[in-house]
Image: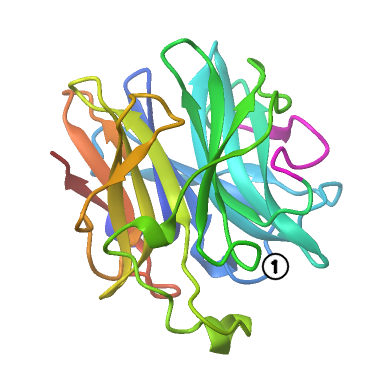
């Protein structure tokens, strides 16, 4: 099948042993009860096989909704799926699953989330620093933080637990292009200015600089912006680009290199329920 026929949000592409693997949030269960994640496989980014169910809640896993934004990374021969989960009566959080195959089956590494208990946290992303330190990059979002925080948490080498306290890098309202969401009162019952912090992803550019893409609300809806670490470290400080790199009704992207070494951005567009599709664009 072609990308335009795959209905997912929050796409993530892993290139492993010459094969591309695509993960994402199932659009049909994004806003209600959910129980799993799928992956797709391709040799050329054009034709895709799947879906292959890579994780399924057999009834023993705690989460019943908010199965969002699975990101897959391979470290030391183990595949880790970093995902958002939720359930009634408790805050959303990020949990890490593992497998010996990019197609799973994945199983939780720990019985609960790795983000701070009681925090509403979404969109976890693993980043490995040049010295080998593992970090969890994530959004500390509403209703906790109305400015929309982007945070990092240092992790053990085996990703089993945090080794320190979370660090707030910056807030969505610090990006010059970011705007308060216009539906905070109607959808969340919150008065005043409320900012989205969504989909952070950090990567090394070709010149060695450390960059991050992030999603928030702009003048034309859901959008992706970018920031540069002035120290070259994940802890920043971070300088925001003045304008978003993807401006209208699309977001939650990540950056990957093709087999040919070309840098690409994949995101979902449009940001409309059951119409979302992965879109791959060139990035410079």
Q: Is 101 within the magenta?
A: no
| Span shown in magenta | 104-116
Q: Main secondary structure of the magenta part?
A: loop
**Is 121 on the left or on the right of 234, as rendered?**
right
- At a point 65% along the width and 28% down the height, the residue shown is 98
Using the rendered view, name the quadrant where residue 256 is placed. top left
In percent of width and height, residue 132 lies at 50, 12
Foreground residue, 236 or 41? Answer: 236
The residue that label 1 is drawn on is 33
Q: Is residue 276 above or below residue 85?
A: below
In percent of width and height, residue 24 lies at 48, 50
Q: Is residue 105 above or below residue 249?
A: above
In percent of width and height, residue 279 lies at 26, 54
- At a point 27% along the width and 61% down the height, the residue shown is 176
Q: Secondary structure at mark 1?
A: loop
**Is 250 on the left or on the right of 191, as rendered?**
left
């Amino acid at each position: 099948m072609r990308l335009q026929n795959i209905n997912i949000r929050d796409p993530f592409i892993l290139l492993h042993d010459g094969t591309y693997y695509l993960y994402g949030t199932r659009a049909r269960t994004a806003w209600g009860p959910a129980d799993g994640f799928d992956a797709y496989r391709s040799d050329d980014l054009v034709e895709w096989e799947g879906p292959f169910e890579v994780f399924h809640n057999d009834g023993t896993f705690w989460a019943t909704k908010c199965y969002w934004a699975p990101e897959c990374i391979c470290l030391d021969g183990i595949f880790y799926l970093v995902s958002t989960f939720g359930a009634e009566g408790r805050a959303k959080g990020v949990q890490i699953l593992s497998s010996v195959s990019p197609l799973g089956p994945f199983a939780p590494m720990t019985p609960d989330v790795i983000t701070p208990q009681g925090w509403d946290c979404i969109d976890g992303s693993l980043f490995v620093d040049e010295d080998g330190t593992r970090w969890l990059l994530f959004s500390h979002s509403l209703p906790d933080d109305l400015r929309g925080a982007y945070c990092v948490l240092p992790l053990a080498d085996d990703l089993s637990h945090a080794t320190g306290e979370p660090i707030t890098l910056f807030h969505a309202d610090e990006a010059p292009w970011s705007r308060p969401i216009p539906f905070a009162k109607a959808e969340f019952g919150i008065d005043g200015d409320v900012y989205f912090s969504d989909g952070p992803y950090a990567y090394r550019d070709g010149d060695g600089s450390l960059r991050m893409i992030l999603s928030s609300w702009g003048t034309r809806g859901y959008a992706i912006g970018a920031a540069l670490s002035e120290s070259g470290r994940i802890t920043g400080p971070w300088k925001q680009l003045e304008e978003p790199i993807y401006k209208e009704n699309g977001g939650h992207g990540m950056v990957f290199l093709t087999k040919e070494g070309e840098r690409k951005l994949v995101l979902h567009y449009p940001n409309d329920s059951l119409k979302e599709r992965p879109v791959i664009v060139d990035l410079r």
